[in-house]
């Protein structure tokens, strides 16, 4: 046998096996996988550090943050063809004092390329009146008004020299689902089609979001702590919710 024929005989099985190997980017029907969402808490571009760092609002007033918590729920993914997948029982409480809470894992998601993500900032209407619940919705998390039968969607507490409250306190507990003081808001963003969220059985992508606590106090209405430093639902909470509806979250990047 000539050398060329011998080499060809060796190469043929390799070529055949290579042609049979699945592409790393192939989507198999009816398969599911996992991805994570990471929330990086900031204040107007600076890292959020509880109790110590001083920040400024749009009015130039100084403030510190002691507590910052918020709900992310009803996470919905969309494909370019219009297919929508609502991740069931997706209720998560992000707490700036607990670093482990800032990374959440979403399981059993159908494989595919997703070009849009949407989620509720807070807790949907039905769950506000569903009685005692567990996990992220457990009232023991300190995000439920027993006197008002509803969840606190975003909790911000801190101090400001300009606050006229006792001990210069800032207390913003945003919640309420009944009109005209409904504070349920939705975050939605398109994902670059050149780099969609690629859910694959052999890959677990990560979505990285920037969360700006400073967005509570600027946007539709710039808030002065000398005038507004306390709210637990009602019309003042609507003012804050309208501010953060468009500024609290930003999709920064995706690691596929």
Image (cartoon, grey):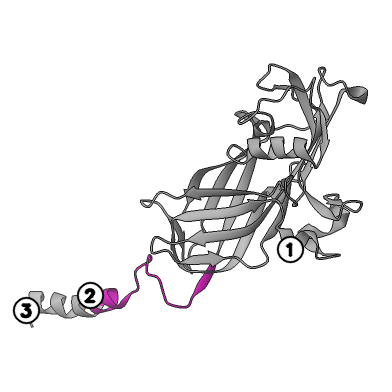
**Circle 3 residue:** 2
Q: Position of residue 103 (x, y in %)?
A: 65, 51
Checking the image for residue 126, the label placed there is 1
Image quarter in which the N terminus is found:
bottom left
Q: Looking at the rendering, which quadrant does residue 138 occupy?
A: bottom right
Residues shaded magenta: 14-33
Mark 3 and mark 1 in contact? Answer it, CB < 8 Å: no
Q: How far, Cα to Cα, is label 3 from label 2?
A: 20 Å
Q: Position of residue 82 (x, y in %)?
A: 42, 63
Above or below, 140 against 252 in this view is below
The residue sitting at 70% across, 36% down in the picture is 240
Q: From this viewpoint, is residue 41 visible?
A: no
Above or below, 50 against 127 in this view is above
Q: Position of residue 63 (x, y in %)?
A: 76, 23
**Circle 2 residue:** 15
Residue situated furthest left in the rendering: 2
Q: Secondary structure at mark 2?
A: helix
The residue sitting at 50% across, 48% down in the picture is 189
């Amino acid at each position: 046998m000539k050398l060329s024929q011998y080499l060809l005989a060796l190469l043929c099985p390799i070529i055949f096996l290579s042609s049979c190997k699945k592409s790393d980017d192939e989507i198999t029907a009816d398969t599911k996988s996992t991805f994570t969402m990471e929330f990086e808490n900031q204040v107007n571009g600076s890292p959020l550090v509880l109790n110590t760092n001083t920040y400024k609002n749009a009015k130039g007033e100084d403030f510190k943050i002691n507590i910052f918590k918020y709900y992310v729920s009803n996470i919905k993914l969309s494909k370019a063809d219009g297919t929508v997948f609502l991740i069931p029982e997706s209720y998560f409480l992000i707490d700036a004092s607990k670093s482990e809470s800032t990374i959440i894992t979403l399981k059993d998601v159908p494989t595919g390329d997703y070009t849009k993500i949407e989620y509720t900032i807070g807790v949907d209407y039905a769950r506000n009146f569903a009685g005692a619940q567990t996990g992220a919705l457990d009232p023991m998390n300190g995000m439920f008004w027993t006197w008002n039968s509803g969840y606190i969607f975003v909790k911000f507490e801190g101090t400001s020299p300009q606050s006229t409250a006792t001990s210069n306190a800032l207390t913003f507990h945003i919640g309420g689902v009944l009109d005209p003081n409904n504070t349920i808001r939705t975050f939605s963003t398109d994902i670059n089609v050149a780099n969609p969220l690629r859910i694959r059985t052999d890959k677990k992508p990560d979505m990285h979001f920037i969360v700006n606590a400073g967005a509570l106090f600027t946007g539709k209405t710039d808030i002065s702590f000398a005038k507004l430093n306390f709210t637990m639902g009602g019309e003042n909470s609507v003012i804050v919710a309208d501010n953060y509806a468009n500024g609290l979250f930003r999709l920064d990047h995706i690691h596929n």
